[in-house]
């Protein structure tokens, strides 16, 4: 039987085996999803000093060196895919493939294929860290873009989200998109929601390119 890591790597490589997971970007109406590059790490590190973001993402504060190590591990992990979210309104000039556009980075979105019994089930997380880019539909578009990408490149059939019960905005957004409550953890005060990909209003067709 094929190991989960090999299956995930094969799914994203595609038939020709030439395109790796760190080489993709996706373009939407308001947002661009780009690979998480080393150039993004310092700004990401600044975000993760905010106690509110640490609580919302269930994270611990790290040093900058530790953040670079986390970046490296995320990049190499075949069961995780991370994009940095760019706000199109903040891009200076035109979007240029290969340019990290750190001036426009406002958050990140991730999927984890961490269920050993079903490698086509993905947990999804999103963070819009910059206040100026909240409240204008960016989060919803980014979630739909990421899920469309995951269906196309990883053949994901079910999405799962784990959200703190105090994060009412995120719970409202995922439920609005069609996610249903699956379980609740009293210990972690966390709601688990799930949705079949076939029942979601995915952002399709999605413009995907090679970095």
Image (cartoon, helix red, strand yellow):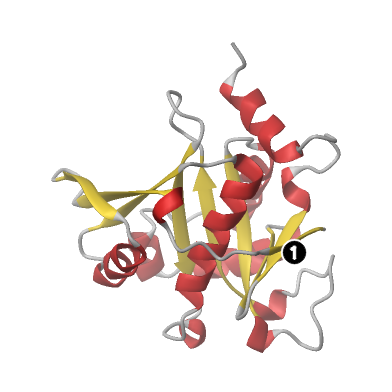
Viewer-closest of 157 and 108: 157
On-image quarter of the N terminus: top right
Q: Residue 16 location in percent, x, y? A: 85, 35
Residue for point 51% across, 31% down: 119
Q: On the picture, is 205 further left or further right than 180?
A: right
Q: Is residue 87 above or below residue 154?
A: below
Instruction: Please indicate, yes or no, whether residue 134 appears anywhere in the rendered image.
Output: yes
Q: Residue 101 location in percent, x, y? A: 75, 75
Q: Is residue 192 above or below residue 32?
A: above
Viewer-closest of 13 and 83: 13
On-image quarter of the C terminus: bottom right
Viewer-closest of 180 and 199: 199
Specify few, some or many for label 1: CA neighbours under 10 Å numbering under 14, 14-19, or 20 or more: few
Q: On the picture, is 8 further left or further right than 17?
A: left
Residue for point 51% across, 69% down: 47
Total labels: the figure holds 1
Q: On the picture, is 179 further left or further right than 165?
A: right
Q: On the picture, is 105 further left or further right than 53?
A: right
Residue at the top extreme of this rendering: 1
Q: Is residue 155 above or below residue 202?
A: above
Q: Residue 93 location in percent, x, y? A: 81, 88
Dot 1: what SS?
Answer: helix
Residue at the left extreme of this rendering: 186
Instruction: Please indicate, yes or no, whether residue 191 appears anywhere in the rendered image.
Output: no
Viewer-closest of 205 and 44: 205
Residue for point 72% across, 84% down: 91
| Residue located beneath label 1 in the image | 39
Residue for point 51% across, 72% down: 141
């Amino acid at each position: 039987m094929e190991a989960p890591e090999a299956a995930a790597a094969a799914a994203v490589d595609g038939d020709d085996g030439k395109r790796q997971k760190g080489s993709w970007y996706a373009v939407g109406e308001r947002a661009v999803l780009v690979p998480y590059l080393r150039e993004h790490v310092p700004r990401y590190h600044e975000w993760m000093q905010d106690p509110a973001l640490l609580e919302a993402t269930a994270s611990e504060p790290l040093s900058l060196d530790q953040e670079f190590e986390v970046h490296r591990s995320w990049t190499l992990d075949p069961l995780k895919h991370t994009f940095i979210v760019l706000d199109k309104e903040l891009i200076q000039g035109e979007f240029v493939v290969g340019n990290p556009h750190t001036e426009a980075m406002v958050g990140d979105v991730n999927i984890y294929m961490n269920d050993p019994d079903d490698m086509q089930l993905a947990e999804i997380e999103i963070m819009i860290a910059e206040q100026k880019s909240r409240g204008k539909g960016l989060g919803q578009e980014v979630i739909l873009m990421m899920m469309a990408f995951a269906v196309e490149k990883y053949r994901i059939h079910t999405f799962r989200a784990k959200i703190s019960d105090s994060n009412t905005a995120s719970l409202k957004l995922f439920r609005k998109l069609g996610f249903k409550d699956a379980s609740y953890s009293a210990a972690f005060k966390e709601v688990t929601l799930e949705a079949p990909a076939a029942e979601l209003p995915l952002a399709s067709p999605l413009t995907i390119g090679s970095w």
